[in-house]
Amino acid sequence: CFAGCSLPNRKVKLTLGNPTMLPFLFFFLFCSSDTEFSITLNRKDALTEDQKTLASYGIVSGDLICLLLEEADGQPNLPPPPSTPPRLENGHEPSTLIPNKSQANSPNEEGQNEQSENQKAQVEVQKTDERAGSSLEFPSGLVPEDVDLEEGTGSYPSEPMLCSEAADGEIPHSLEMLYLSAECTSATDALIVLVHLLMMETGYVPQGTEAKAVSMPEKWRGNGVYKLQYTHPLCEEGSAGLTCVPLGDLVAINATLKINKEIKGVKRIQLLPASFVCFQEPEKVAGVYKDLQKLSRLFKDQLVYSLLAAARQALNLPDVFGLVVLPLELKLRIFRLLDVRSLISLSAVCRDLYTASNDQLLWRFMYLRDFRGLVTQTGKK
């Protein structure tokens, strides 16, 4: 076989018979030299068994064999230690000493040394993991000492983002900011602030050069009447205006749709402020509002979405939401949940719903569900 021999200043390529004994290799290399040396394959662990062959160590043609020359004091000439601590391999520190025949320990001593080294390595690894874990969970300078990290408390509490998500005693942060900026003096003021936020939640943009998401528009309140103006990205050529008028215990909200400054439609809804506002302690914002989920559903379904749909219809734009734009498969699934009378009423709403409801398989299902038993009983009679 062929083996490369690496010396401090030269490399020699050898042609040796196979198998080759280690003593023969020693004699071949240093038959005329008194220098003591050790043979290693990894620059760390010496080959100390004389009766072993090169093939038994897995040496093949082209492998590099390293010779470590010993100094005058009998210690091997080792490579200089690295500047950084050696990397742990499988929880054990790599060997840094290369023993020769005279330095080899007995098997018992080696076992004890390995066990003690393993224990030390495990302790070091555990300490390192603890230090790393603490630095990952609480980076220095990023988490204040007084922060409560429990769920739902501390500097980052769990709070609703929309009114439809708010339970009693909770309000979105945006509603709190609007309420504080509006300086409400009555339950009606607080209700109009909430209506304004619901409009913005559905994509309406308040008009006015100074209108911001965290403050009410200018001149939104005056002479007992509240007026708000909006546009929507889905119908930029149109605008919507809310006129809110208190009528005793009720508040009448008229939504006016304008296309090119021409009124195209009006939507109306009446709300009872006492049902959604408790103005006994106005300084506690979270306690001012109640039943936000109910009002969000009621106001959006009866006014906001229908207003937006009317605006797109007036602009000859396709619908973007609602029952009409659903795929036919989903419409049929919904229709199957209705009774016959409700299905007939739904089919009279518009041409699209009439076409979708005039499905033979749907009416077969309705017949088998609602009338099959009646027909069987009539036939028996």
Image: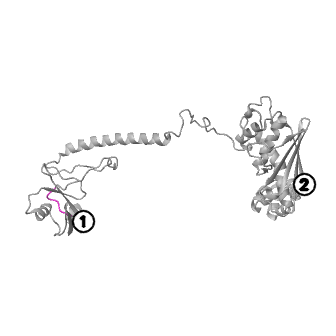
Q: Quadrant of the N terminus?
A: bottom left
Badge 2 density bin: few <14, some 14–19, many ≥20, Cα 10 Å: some
Residue 144, x across and y down, in percent: 54, 36
At a point 57% along the width and 35% down the height, the residue shown is 150
Q: Is residue 244 magenta?
A: no
Q: Position of residue 322 (x, y in %)?
A: 79, 56
The residue mark sitting in front, 2 or 1, is 2
Q: Which mark is residue 180?
A: none
Residue at screen point 59% across, 37% down: 151
Residue 347 lies in quadrant:
bottom right
Q: Which residues are magenta?
A: 49-54
Magenta-colored stretch includes residue 53: yes
Q: Secondary structure at mark 2?
A: strand
Figure quadrant of residue 34: bottom left
**Label 1: few (<14), some (14–19) or many (≥20) C-alpha neighbours in 10 Å:** some
Question: Percent x, y for residue 57?
Answer: 22, 60
Is residue 380 visible in this depiction of the protein? Answer: no
Q: Is residue 331 visible?
A: yes
Q: What x and y, as percent, mark residue 196?
A: 80, 44
Residue at the spot of label 1: 63
Furthest-front residue in this view: 209
Left or right of 287 on screen, residue 80? left
Residue type at the position of mark 2: Gly
**Residue drawn at point x = 76 percent, y = 38 percent:** 181
Residue under label 2, please give it: 265
Query: In this orientation, which residue lies closer to the viewer: 302 or 222?
Result: 222
